[in-house]
Image (spheres, grey):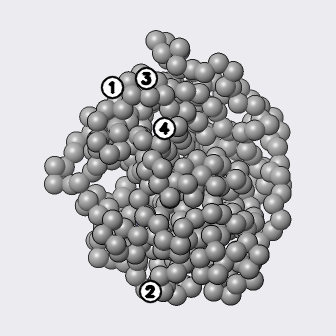
């Protein structure tokens, strides 16, 4: 773990200004907001790294603008992925905060379906409102209302190829699960060049006064620093260095529901994220489940919105006043960051195992950081989990 003054990210050389065609397919061009093309000034993020770091890995952000969802699904969009594509991250933001959002189709130039609306679904598994997406070769889930995301590839069994990819978005009302009608703001982040062998993850820590922590006291608070160090040590297993870019105060209640939703305290908290280019880490007193049990941490998404500040899911929230040791709190932080960067539980509570062959498939095996429940003891990240983590748009070269 390192702490450093925020620095402006280096602007890319030729790579990020190279044209990447992102066009909506014929038939739905009216859903594009004119003038939403991205310029390098506000969205392209790149870091070529030091000269000895090997081939550059660059993330380009492309605003697709508002995409119409009618009757619960969008028309097909087409993304032309470049020859050196490494990974694709899609972020969907619903301004009404009411919709559960998911990518329901991701189909490549050769007809390969990474997210397959016709994927076989085991009826014994509880897979949520989009079971085929969750059971797809590159699983996609709608975790919480307001913001949805997809990271591809999130499994070694699939890969992106250059050329036109077809994409559809699905949405239901989070409360009723009725098909949603609305316009969703979509951004596609394309990592190109080379996969990151090592990466840095910039975070910004927000204090609400819980456990006496403020932006002024947090940098020197021994317990918090021990938690951050524990999280950094866990992520270091995946060649990721956690970098704390700064501390800020945020406004939030001492205890709040762990569930998000329209007008929820959790979303009001996440919306205070104001440090673009970082993942927000919000320290609250207690997150509480509907039946009153304490929740140690919550991730804003799976994956969450990288880089984008101020959405209702911009970060992770952590309970710091429920009696956990600093080490356990750090473990929870690393686990929630894992979700925010695109990792599933090794086995989801509904019974679906993650798509990674090198993680345990036994829900009672708690040796992995992404085990479905927190346990004391060693917590590992596997090589395949590391590859997923480093593919996401929130990370850059060390
Ligand atoms: Zn979890």
Residue 76: which disc? 3
- How far separated are the C-alphas under marks 3 and 1? 14 Å
Q: Which residue is mark 1?
A: 71
- In the image, 203 versus 24, the foreground residue is 203
- How far separated are the C-alphas under marks 2 and 3? 46 Å
Instruction: Relative to 345, say whether 110 is above or below.
Output: above
Residue at image coords 52%, 19%: 31
Q: Are marks 4 and 3 in contact (CB under 8 Å)?
A: no
Residue 295 location, quadrant: bottom left
**Image quadrant in which the C terminus is located:** bottom right
Per the image, label 4 sits on a secondary structure element best described as loop
Task: Indicate the position of residue 107 as horizontal and vertical percent values.
Answer: 41, 31
Residue 377: which disc? 2
Report whether 247 appears left or right of 176.
right
- How far separated are the C-alphas under marks 4 and 2? 42 Å
Residue at image coords 52%, 87%: 325
- In the image, 385 versus 244, the foreground residue is 244
Viewer can see residue 371: no
Q: Tag 3 or tag 4, which sits nearer the N-term?
A: 3
The nearer-to-camera label among 2 and 1 is 1
Per the image, label 2 sits on a secondary structure element best described as loop
Q: Which residue is mark 4?
A: 96
The nearer-to-camera label among 4 and 3 is 4
Q: Are marks 2 and 3 in contact (CB under 8 Å)?
A: no
- How far separated are the C-alphas under marks 2 and 1? 47 Å
Q: Are marks 4 and 2 in contact (CB under 8 Å)?
A: no
Q: Tag 4 or tag 1, which sits nearer the N-term?
A: 1
**How many C-alpha atoms fall within 10 Å of the one at disc 4: few (<14), some, or many (≥20)?**
some
């Amino acid at each position: 773990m390192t702490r450093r003054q925020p620095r402006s990210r280096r602007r890319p050389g030729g790579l990020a200004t190279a044209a990447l065609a992102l066009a909506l397919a014929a038939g739905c061009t009216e859903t594009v907001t004119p003038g939403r093309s991205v310029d390098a000034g506000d969205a392209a993020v790149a870091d070529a790294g030091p000269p000895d770091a090997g081939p550059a890995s660059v993330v380009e952000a492309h605003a697709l603008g508002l995409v119409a969802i009618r009757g619960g699904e969008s028309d097909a969009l087409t993304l032309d992925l470049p020859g050196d594509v490494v990974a694709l991250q899609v972020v969907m933001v619903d301004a009404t905060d009411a919709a559960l959002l998911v990518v329901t189709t991701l189909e490549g130039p050769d007809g390969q379906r990474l997210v397959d609306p016709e994927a076989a679904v085991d009826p014994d598994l509880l897979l949520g409102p989009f079971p085929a997406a969750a059971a797809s070769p590159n699983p996609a889930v709608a975790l919480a209302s307001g913001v949805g995301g997809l990271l591809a590839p999130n499994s070694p069994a699939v890969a992106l190829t250059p050329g036109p990819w077809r994409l559809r978005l699905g949405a239901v009302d989070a409360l009723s699960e009725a098909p949603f009608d609305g316009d969703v703001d979509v951004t596609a982040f394309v990592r190109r060049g080379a996969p990151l062998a090592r990466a840095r993850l910039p975070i910004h820590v927000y204090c609400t006064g819980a456990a006496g922590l403020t932006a002024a006291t947090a940098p020197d608070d021994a317990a918090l620093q021990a938690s951050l160090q524990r999280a950094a040590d866990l992520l270091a297993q995946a060649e990721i260095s956690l970098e704390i870019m700064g501390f800020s105060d945020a406004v939030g209640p001492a205890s709040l529901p762990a569930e998000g939703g329209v007008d929820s305290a959790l979303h009001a908290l996440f919306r205070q994220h104001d440090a673009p280019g970082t993942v927000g880490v919000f320290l609250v007193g207690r997150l509480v489940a509907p039946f009153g049990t304490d929740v140690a941490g919550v991730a804003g998404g799976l994956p969450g919105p990288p880089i984008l500040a101020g959405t209702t899911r911009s970060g992770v929230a952590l309970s710091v006043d429920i009696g956990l040791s600093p080490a356990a709190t750090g473990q929870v932080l690393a686990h929630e960051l894992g979700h925010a960067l695109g990792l599933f539980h090794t086995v989801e509570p509904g019974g679906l195992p993650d798509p990674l062959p090198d993680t345990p498939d036994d829900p009672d095996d708690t040796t992995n950081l992404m085990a479905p429940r927190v346990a004391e003891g060693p917590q590992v990240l596997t090589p395949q989990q590391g590859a997923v983590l480093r593919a996401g748009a929130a990370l850059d070269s060390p």
